[in-house]
Image (spheres, rainbow, N blue to C red):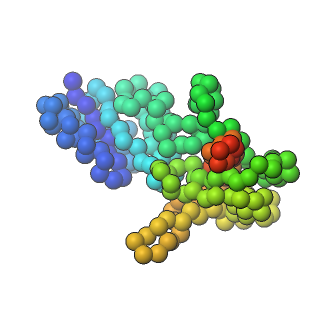
Amino acid sequence: MKLGVLKSFCGEYMHYVRSCRELGIEHEVVDIIAPDWMERVERSGCDGFLCRPPSKVQERKTMFDERLTILNRFMKREIYPSLDEMLIYENKRMAHYWLKLQGFPHPDTWIFYRKGDLSKFLREFKDYPLISKTNIGAQSSGVRVLRSPGAVKGIGRMVFGIFRTPSMVTGYTPVRSGSVIRVPAYGLRERHSPKLSDSSYFHLREHSFHQIQGQGFIFA
């Protein structure tokens, strides 16, 4: 048996490499990020592939989800973890859909892709505060506490724009803590959709909001 270790943007894939070496398993590092990744997969002759998808930048995570779907569903290659597990990993929207479908207790969540739907929600929702969290990002990254309708509207304007023109949307930029000062994480900017959750998440155009102790929403 020969295993392929899918290369990642950072060095996490090396944990798989070291484990294969220690266990004496034949393996090969395959660069799934390369433009000719499909040809590399074919040439490797591997029986299955080990993957550690990215967890910080949405576009990189989306790329991995797309290529792993092609690798597993269409090229018929086995992958670990499974594709189903990969798709909900570091994706608050997908995790909500999956938890709801499986009947697991979790915060009630609303996801918006139209500004009008968000406006209607704001007219009816009264139980603040809400917590906002970006769709991707571990632990407390991309989190904001929203204590009023005005705070939610502010993020809504960034995510959906003031006008009904997608090209005019600036997007929501999370702030990351540096060693000395807090700086905008422009590479994590999100646009175009939100999600609300009862008790912990709220997404905004690829952004999520959860209410403390009860409700929240996400701008996807």
Residue at the outermost bottom position: 180
- Is residue 166 toward the left or the right of residue 100 in the image? right
| Quadrant, the N terminus | top left
Q: Residue at x 39, y 31 (%)?
A: 81
Residue at the outermost front position: 213
Observer able to see residue 72: yes
Q: Nearer the viewer, residue 33 or 198?
A: 198
Image coordinates of residue 178 in percent, x first then y, are 43, 70
Image coordinates of residue 147 in percent, x first then y, are 71, 59
Image coordinates of residue 115 in percent, x first then y, are 79, 53
Q: Give the number of marks.
A: 0
Image coordinates of residue 72 in percent, x first then y, are 43, 29
Q: Nearer the viewer, residue 91 or 34?
A: 91
Instruction: Identify whether 173 is placed above or below 109.
Output: below
Q: Residue at x 61, y 59 (%)?
A: 144
- Is residue 191 toward the left or the right of residue 77 in the image? right
Observer able to see residue 40: no
Q: Residue at x 48, y 39 (%)?
A: 89
Q: Nearer the viewer, residue 74 or 169?
A: 169
Q: Residue at x 47, y 27 (%)?
A: 73
Quadrant assignment, res 39: top left
Instruction: Identify whether 38 is placed above or below 79.
Output: below
- Is residue 15 toward the left or the right of residue 104 in the image? left
